[in-house]
Image (cartoon, grey):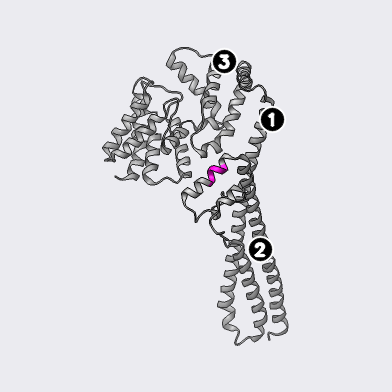
Amino acid sequence: MDQNDILKSAPSFVIHYVQQQASSVQLPYHNMLHTEKVVEAAKQIASHYQLNEDDFLVVLVSAWFHDLGYYSGETTGHEAKGADLAAQFLTGKGVDDKIIAAVRGCIMATQMPQRPVTMLEKIVCDADLFHFGTDEFPDRNKLMRKECEVALQKEISKKEWRASTIKLLQAHHYHTDYCQLLLNEKKQENLERLLKKDKSAALEFVGDVISQSSANTDEKRKVEKPVRGIETMFRVASTNHQRLSDMADSKANIMISVNAIIISVVIGFVGRKLESAQEMLVPTMILLIGCVTAIIFAVLATRPKIPDGFFTPEQVDKRTANILFFGNFYRMNYDQYYDGMKKVMADSEFLYGSLIRDIHSQGKVLGSKYKQLRISYTVFMYTLIVSVLAFGITFIFFVK
């Protein structure tokens, strides 16, 4: 089985099949544009989870074929038709039955309401409805309405379509952690925009919430937005720290490279002439010592510091363990780490405390990095000034 050949020929097969049926089937939404966007989203999610080659193949082939059944007849049961076409294609490529079965499962899992079981099925399902949590949702939703009108052969009012879309968004949830963190906030914004446009749906939605728990509705409303704001704050802070860390590493790399070049040039060209020009020794040593010192501090800024690699159950019980940082668990087995993570996820105070501790630790590391980088750059700057002056004085007063 040549996986690269399959990944290259699958799009060609799908595009050719669609072109053959294009004259008899017109789909405003479930067309090649939608398929390509689903494939792009599937690649993004699969890359995040670092799938192996076989799993990556399953996800991408499923994404290409998941809606191909729309072009072979009735929309009802199109998932099964798409799965059959995918199986036919893969069988012709000599693919193992296990992979074909996995592709079938992924395509069938996209049937609404989605009920994925395996991780690969969850990835494909989230890729299929990825646009729910993006700015493309309003435009894609309009195309879906047009397609439904064509299929039902009747006009659907904006109010009726909006109400059905609201119910769909309220019932939908992303299955992978990655999409939940990435898309939930925007999906909620898309839902709230629809609710504002449809006052009756909004009142019904609020009424349902009040009927479920009228005593603490006001408290929930006060808590919901701060919780989302807190999660955004943590995400932004962590991203900013990572960006600053990358910048520090880049600056340290520049300092190491520049000083290493200077040292090699000085040793190569000036070192050979020191025997006949002893007066050049002092400025040369100043330059070399300064460059080496700058390199040392730049290396210290990027040198990783790894903790012991484990935490104790007592630390978890006392909520003092930061189990979100790999350096605190890389020497532990999976079961120990899993037990710790369950306790974190079950306790919101512990969870937020761990996030705070993680960001604080990142800040301390960044502070140490930038402090050592500042010393490195300062040493480099004064070394250049002093050495240039020393070389100038030497040439003026000592070189004849």
Q: Residues within 10 Å of mark 2 (few under 14, many from 20)?
A: many
The answer to whether residue 132 is seen in the rendering is: yes
Percent of width and height locating residue 314: 58, 51
Mark nearer the N terminus (2 vs 1)? 1
Q: Which residue is mark 2?
A: 372
Quarter holding residue 150 = top left
Q: What stretch of residues is rendered in magenta? A: 340-344
Q: Is residue 379 above or below residue 143?
A: below
Residue beneath label 3, please?
A: 159
Q: Work out whether residue 235 can be spotted.
A: no
Q: Is residue 269 above or below residue 326?
A: below
**Residue 274 locus on image (x, y percent):** 60, 84
Name the quarter where the C terminus is drawn: bottom right
In which quadrant of the rendered image does the N terminus lie? top left
In the image, 319: left or right of 62?
right
Provide the secondary structure element on which disc 2 rests: helix
Q: Compare residues 40 and 195 and report the one nearer the observer.
A: 195
Label 1 packing within 10 angstroms: few (<14), some (14-19), many (20+): few
Q: Residue at x 59, y 22 (%)?
A: 194
Q: The residue under label 1 is which amino acid type?
A: Lys
Looking at the image, is mark 1 or mark 3 nearer the viewer?
A: 1
Q: Kindly identify which residue carries mark 1.
A: 222
Disc 3 residue crowd, few under 14, some 14–19, many 20+, Cα 10 Å: few
Residue 299, quarter of the rendered image: bottom right
Q: Amino acid at mark 3?
A: Lys
The label on residue 252 is none
Task: Indicate the position of residue 304 as horizontal and vertical percent values.
Answer: 57, 61
Q: Quadrant of residue 117?
A: top left
Does 39 sit left or right of 378 as displayed?
left
Residue at image location 59% in from the left, 58% down from the top: 249
- Residue 343 part of the magenta-drawn span: yes
Q: Main secondary structure of the magenta part?
A: helix
